[in-house]
């Protein structure tokens, strides 16, 4: 076999591929679809035995469930519009309106305030806010937020920004459980402009952070901040893969890439040459391919329990519980009561309850024994939901682990190091490592990258020769 091969796509009749996409998660699937729709021939390489990355499904106690992301942000309508393109618009559903709770460090649990944005209160006199942060915490937050708008506005990361405007109680008891649950990182490590675009500008415009939150909420469309798909988010991957097959994109599973540059990829000992290379992998794999050493990214472990327990029928803690830092009575960082959150799933479960708990390393690692993890998850679920759960009532359970995002310096002085992986010269990057977490950010950035490649001439030579 020759050492140097031209990448090919069987769907294009064996003609050379214009673009090789490395990584078959949602970002890789989206960028491959956009490129193929624009006339480029595409070869997609995925190292594992399945496509979809952190969006997938597994079967627990006979129920097909999302194994990863089970909702998406509705802000901007990005995901909904894309699902419409894929013929899934009629199956977009909103979660139950009961909302989530927060489990505080002292073991108390409260409903999360409804007037906030990512936990930042829009009304510091709201009884739900006072219940969580206390009268003293609210009084301090009001004093801090009465400062001139310029105070704290130049803070680029979420933690210092909230501390400057509203203090530690708001940060620790409201913002950190929500932001940490969504982004799997502490607010000190997250850019304000990435987590909530426009918030700092709104502070300067409105004069206070509370007023800024209310103004951004007023601009948002009515309805929930998140939505999902009837049948599970994994249907997005099913639709993308079906469309790629229709468009003639070759997708190779078990294809481990050992090296790449702007015009070639080495896979299984073969060097494939193409006009462009797109890297669509996570932080750790990206660093390895870039030849950059890094510490292990750690793990996010999701534990799913299917439970038959009538005491859970009332949804005692709404759609789930977020855990504030410092809680010593549970190890989980969050719990989703999925059969309360999604009515379609409750119908499918037939009286059983689906609970999803998430754990960070080193609390739970790959080496944590199954029996230990199952017992911990059952105990945590009982504490967080305030309902005793008999282990014999658990009809099925499963564990799934994902690489956690790597922390990265994010100050203005280190702007060049904001992205967890520095791009290889000429290699185009897509995915959560550069776009930010969440389907909305990933889809938007992947489509923009494909559009830029197509406008730059990728695929035009093949189109002219047809």
Image (cartoon, rainbow, N blue to C red):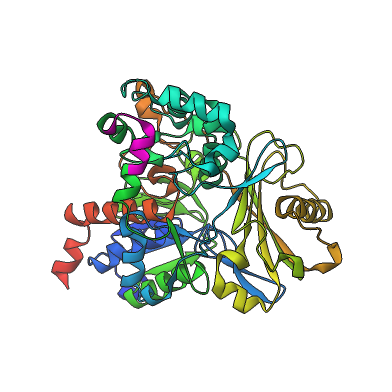
Q: Position of residue 259 (x, y in %)?
A: 46, 46
Between 337 and 433, the residue placed more toward the observer is 337
Quadrant, the C terminus: bottom left
Q: Is residue 394 left or right of residue 155?
A: right
Is residue 2 found inside the magenta-colored segment of the image?
no
Can I make out residue 402 in this image?
yes
Q: Residue reaching furthest left?
A: 464
Examine the residues drawn in magenta and state their main secondary structure: helix
Residue 28: horizontal and vertical position, in percent?
A: 40, 58
| 71 up-or-down from 93: above or below | above
Residue visible at 46% across and 25% down? 160
Q: Nearer the viewer, residue 116 or 128?
A: 128
> Which one is nearer the viewer's eye here, 115 or 230?
115
Q: Position of residue 355 (x, y in %)?
A: 67, 61
Task: For residue 275, say whether it is visible.
Answer: no
The residue shown at (57%, 53%) is: 100
Q: Position of residue 419 (x, y in %)?
A: 41, 36
Residue visible at 23% across and 67% down in the picture: 39
Q: Which residues are magenta?
A: 206-214
Does the magenta portion include 209? yes
């Amino acid at each position: 076999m020759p050492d140097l091969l031209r990448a090919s796509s069987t769907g294009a009749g064996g003609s050379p591929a214009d673009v090789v996409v490395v990584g078959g998660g949602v970002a890789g699937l989206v960028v491959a679809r956009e490129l193929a729709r624009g006339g480029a021939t595409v070869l997609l390489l995925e190292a594992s035995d399945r496509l979809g990355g952190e969006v997938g499904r597994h079967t627990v106690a006979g129920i097909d469930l999302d194994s990863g992301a089970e909702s998406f942000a509705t802000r901007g309508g990005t995901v909904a519009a894309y699902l419409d393109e894929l013929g899934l618009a009629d199956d977009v559903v909103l979660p139950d309106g009961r909302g989530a709770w927060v489990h505080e460090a002292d073991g108390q649990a409260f409903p999360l305030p409804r007037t906030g944005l990512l936990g930042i209160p829009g009304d510091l006199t709201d009884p739900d806010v006072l219940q969580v942060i206390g009268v003293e915490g609210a009084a301090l937050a009001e004093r801090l937020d009465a400062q001139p708008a310029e105070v704290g506005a130049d803070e680029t990361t979420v933690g210092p920004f909230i501390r400057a405007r509203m203090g530690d109680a708001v940060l620790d008891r409201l913002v950190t459980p929500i932001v940490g649950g969504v982004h799997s990182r502490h607010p000190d490590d997250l850019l304000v402009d990435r987590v909530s675009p426009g918030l700092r500008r709104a502070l300067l415009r409105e004069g206070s952070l509370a007023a800024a939150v209310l103004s951004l909420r007023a601009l948002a469309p009515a309805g929930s901040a998140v939505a999902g798909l009837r049948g599970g988010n994994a249907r997005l991957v099913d639709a993308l893969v079906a469309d790629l097959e229709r468009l003639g994109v070759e997708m190779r599973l078990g294809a481990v890439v050992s090296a790449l540059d702007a015009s070639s990829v080495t896979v299984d000992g073969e060097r494939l040459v193409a006009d462009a290379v797109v890297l669509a992998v996570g932080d750790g794999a990206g660093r390895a391919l870039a030849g950059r050493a890094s510490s292990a990214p750690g793990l996010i472990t999701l534990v799913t329990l299917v439970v038959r327990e009538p005491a859970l029928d009332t949804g005692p803690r709404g759609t789930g519980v977020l855990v504030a830092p410092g809680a010593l009575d549970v190890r989980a960082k969050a719990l989703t009561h999925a059969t309360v959150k999604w009515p379609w799933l409750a119908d499918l479960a037939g009286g059983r309850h689906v609970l999803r708990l998430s754990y960070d390393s080193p609390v739970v690692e790959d080496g944590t024994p199954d029996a230990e993890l199952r017992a911990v998850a059952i105990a945590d679920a009982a504490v967080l939901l305030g309902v005793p759960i008999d282990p014999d009532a658990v009809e099925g359970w499963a564990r799934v682990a994902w690489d956690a995002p790597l922390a990265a310096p994010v100050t203005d002085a280190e702007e060049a190091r904001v992205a967890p992986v520095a791009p290889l010269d000429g290699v185009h990057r897509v995915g959560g490592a550069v776009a930010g977490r969440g389907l909305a950010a990933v889809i938007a950035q992947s489509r923009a990258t494909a559009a830029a490649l197509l406008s730059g001439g990728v695929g035009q030579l093949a189109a002219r020769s047809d």
